């Protein structure tokens, strides 16, 4: 592209030559213009333009004249210059085109370089992939020989196991190596299930593992049987020293070899890696345990029975407690020795400890059988309770506690003696039920039982716990202890309470914590219910047999004695914190009786036969504490009614006008005379002053209510004109009567307290 010269100074001079025509001098004579032209020439052509311009003026000075400048060729230099400029422009354009072409070539080269770079990156990536693949193949090629060994191990292992004619192969070191190879191959095929026929090989190696484990078990059992035969050839019952040397020292001589082999089997049973084969391995291990325990049991069972028989013969003159003490000590020592011997044959872990402790229960079976026979013959509650106390140290801690783990880290005596404890508890429960039935339910009360006198409590030989309860009653119930009873507390208890009630409470205090809480709750409900029924029957029988001539004082004493015993029962059972409800079921055969009645009357049908002969199942809800509270309410109400009736007397029975004038005077007199006597009577039976005060307040409330009803009745008769207003006014208002009665009661209580 040719550059435009529109604004060029040379072009302007060439286009407009007339601008210089008025000048007479030559154009080159103008030094200013010449200087500018030289600068322009230098700028365009460098030094060459300046030399050309100077040479023109120097070489041809004669030709440069005013005439020559004025001629048409006077601008030839400018024309040449313009021509030169055009040539330069063309050269510059050519250079520019070359520059553009080179730039395009550079851009193409850069694009090619980018393509080459992308290709190089892809090549590098492919190279890395190939390199990783190569590394994997190299690793695989190196591990192939090792992998092939897992396959190659199978044939010689199977061949050796199939041709093993004796379990003694276990003793060889090569067997241990073979067992290790079985484990490695087995786990290899478990971890690489994608390998061709991996599952088939795994099953075959599993069979090899089971077969090898079975050989270990048989070898160990054979050693046990061999030592058993050696000991059996000798008489182990010769004497104690020889016997212990044979069944312990001789037996322990094979323990090292036995433990080394059996540990390998136990480790595989407990290792989680063998969880898929745990059932088969456990079965093999259990056979070994069973054989060990059978052999030990054959040795020990005759010795154990001999010990039990010796104690039976020796302790005939002693109680069951001495028998339990002797045998408990013996079996504790026996279990400890057997545990130490067992741990010489087997590793000391949870599995082995659990097995040996379960076997101890079988080993102690003679003790269980004998104690069951003795318990069946024992009916003394004190002996049964004391027998249970012998095992108390084994049941002080919870099974999950740290103290329990420390105490029973080896031999779990709590589980070993649990059958003995159960037999004694069952016998105790049965004996307690028989005792309740004999001394409480079947007790025949007499009139003296409800009399506060110096009667004596007749205790049997098997009731020592009642004596203990009576002797310590002052500590159990401090309110009964006064200066008068301090020296002879037992006599006061005997003369103040119902005898079966004392026996029932003594029984509960004796068996408390001897049985579990659920069983005790049931026994406590049963005992309290029996005491209430016996006490109620005695009270009903005595009140029914009382004649009409019986004094009111005696009648109140009977009711107070009944209340006194109920309060004692309420206070004492609070110590046990028994639960409230107990569900029982019974059969109702009342329909059978009605059937026979209908049969005699001739009213019988097939339907009635089927209906009446089927007993009904009755659900009874026995709540001894609720029953006791209800009985207390009935007793208090009964006493309040009788005492209030005694105070009111016949004062409120008549509505005659003559009687109305004396009612208030008579009532006041009765209150003043009888309230102190009744309160004195209450305090003689009830030591708790607060309860005595509540009884007096209840009597006061009852009298107030009776007087208010009578006053309302009189007011109604007055409104009906059956009585005059003057007669009605003879009665004081109920509020005034209540206030007067309250003042008299308060004064009576103050006098009694002071």
Image (cartoon, rainbow, N blue to C red):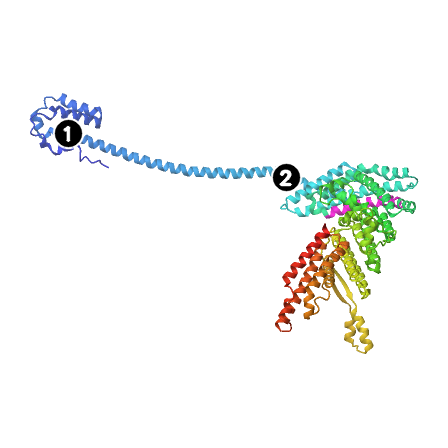
Which stretch is magenta?
279-305
**Position above or below: 74 against 614:** above
- Asked whether, in this view, residue 618 is left or right of residue 129, the answer is right
**Residue drawn at (88%, 42%) of the image:** 229
Q: Is residue 468 within the magenta segment?
A: no
Quarter occupied by residue 1: top left
Of mark 1 and mark 2, the one earlier in the sequence is 1
Mark 1 element type: helix
- Most foreground residue, 598 or 537: 537
Q: Position of residue 79 (x, y in %)?
A: 15, 31
**Position above or below: 524 against 41:** below
**Residue drawn at (11%, 33%) of the image:** 16
Q: Position of residue 432 (x, y in %)?
A: 82, 54
Q: Which mark is residue 78?
A: 1
Q: Is residue 280 within the magenta segment?
A: yes
Quarter occupied by residue 692: bottom right
Q: Of helix, strand and loop, which mostly describes the magenta segment? A: helix
Residue 166 visible in the current orientation: no
Q: Position of residue 298 (x, y in %)?
A: 86, 45
Q: Marks 1 and 2: CB-CB under 8 Å?
A: no
Q: Which mark is residue 144?
A: 2
């Amino acid at each position: 592209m040719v550059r435009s010269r529109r604004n060029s100074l040379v072009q302007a001079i060439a286009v407009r030559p007339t601008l210089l025509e008025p000048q007479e001098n030559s154009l080159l004579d103008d030094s200013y213009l010449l200087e500018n032209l030289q600068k322009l020439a230098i700028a365009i052509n460098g030094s060459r333009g300046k030399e050309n311009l100077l040479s023109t003026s120097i070489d041809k000075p004669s030709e440069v004249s005013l005439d020559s400048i004025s001629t048409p060729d006077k601008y030839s230099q400018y024309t040449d210059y313009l021509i030169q400029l055009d040539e330069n422009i063309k050269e510059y354009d050519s250079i520019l085109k070359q520059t553009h072409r080179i730039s395009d070539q550079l851009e193409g080269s850069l694009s090619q370089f980018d393509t080459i770079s992308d290709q190089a990156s892809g090549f590098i990536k492919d190279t890395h992939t190939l390199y990783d693949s190569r590394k994997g193949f190299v690793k695989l090629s190196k591990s192939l020989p090792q992998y092939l060994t897992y396959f190659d191990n199978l044939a010689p292992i199977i061949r050796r196991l199939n041709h093993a004619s004796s379990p003694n192969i276990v003793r060889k070191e090569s067997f241990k190596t073979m067992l290790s190879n079985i484990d490695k191959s087995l786990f290899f095929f478990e971890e690489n299930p994608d390998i061709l026929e991996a599952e088939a090989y795994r099953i075959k190696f599993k069979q090899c593992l089971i077969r090898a484990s079975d050989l270990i078990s048989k070898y160990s059992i054979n050693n046990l049987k061999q030592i058993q035969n050696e000991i059996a050839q000798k008489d182990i019952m010769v004497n104690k020293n020889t016997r212990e040397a044979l069944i312990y020292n001789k037996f322990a001589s094979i323990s090292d070899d036995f433990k080394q082999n059996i540990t390998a089997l136990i480790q595989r049973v407990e290792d989680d890696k063998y969880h898929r084969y745990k059932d088969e391995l456990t079965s093999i291990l259990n056979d070994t345990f069973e054989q060990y325990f059978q052999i030990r049991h054959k040795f020990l069972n005759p010795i154990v029975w001999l010990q039990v028989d010796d104690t039976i013969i020796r302790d005939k003159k002693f109680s069951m407690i001495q028998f339990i003490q002797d045998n408990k000590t013996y079996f504790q020592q026996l279990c400890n020795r057997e545990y130490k011997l067992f741990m010489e044959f087997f590793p000391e872990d949870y599995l082995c400890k659990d097995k040996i402790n379960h076997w101890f229960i079988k080993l102690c079976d003679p003790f269980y059988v004998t104690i069951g026979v003795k318990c069946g013959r024992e009916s003394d509650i004190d002996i049964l309770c004391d027998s249970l106390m012998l095992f108390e140290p084994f049941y002080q801690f919870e099974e999950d506690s740290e103290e329990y783990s420390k105490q029973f880290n080896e031999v779990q005596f709590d589980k070993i003696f649990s059958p003995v404890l159960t037999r004694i508890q069952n016998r105790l429960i049965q004996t307690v039920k028989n005792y309740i039935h004999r001394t409480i339910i079947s007790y025949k009360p007499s009139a003296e039982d409800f009399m506060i006198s110096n009667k004596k409590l007749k205790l049997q030989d098997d009731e020592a716990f009642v004596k203990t309860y009576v002797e310590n009653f002052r500590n159990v119930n401090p309110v009964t202890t006064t200066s008068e009873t301090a020296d002879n507390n037992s006599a006061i208890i005997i003369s103040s309470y119902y005898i079966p009630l004392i026996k029932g409470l003594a029984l509960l205090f004796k068996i408390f914590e001897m049985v579990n809480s659920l069983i005790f709750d049931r026994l406590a409900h049963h005992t309290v219910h029996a005491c209430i029924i016996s006490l109620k029957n005695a009270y009903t029988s005595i009140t029914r047999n009382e004649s009409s001539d019986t004094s009111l004082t005696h009648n109140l004493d009977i009711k107070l004695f009944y209340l006194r015993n109920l309060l004692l029962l309420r206070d004492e059972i609070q110590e046990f914190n028994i639960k409230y409800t107990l569900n029982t079921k019974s059969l109702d055969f009342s329909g059978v009786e009605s059937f026979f009645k209908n049969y005699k009357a001739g009213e019988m049908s097939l339907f009635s036969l089927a209906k009446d002969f089927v007993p009904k199942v009755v659900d009874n809800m026995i709540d001894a504490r609720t029953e006791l509270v209800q009985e207390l309410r009935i007793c208090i109400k009964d006493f309040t009614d009788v005492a209030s009736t005694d105070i009111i007397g016949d004062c409120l029975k008549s509505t005659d006008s003559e009687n109305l004038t004396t009612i208030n005077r008579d009532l006041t007199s009765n209150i003043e005379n009888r309230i102190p006597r009744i309160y004195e009577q209450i305090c003689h039976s009830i030591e708790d002053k607060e309860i005595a005060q509540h009884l007096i307040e209840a009597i006061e409330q009852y009298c107030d209510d009776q007087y208010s009803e009578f006053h309302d009745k009189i007011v109604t008769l007055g409104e009906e004109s059956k009585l005059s207003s003057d007669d009605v006014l003879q009665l004081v208002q109920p509020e005034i009567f209540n206030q007067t009665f309250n003042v008299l009661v308060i004064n009576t209580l103050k006098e009694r307290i002071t």
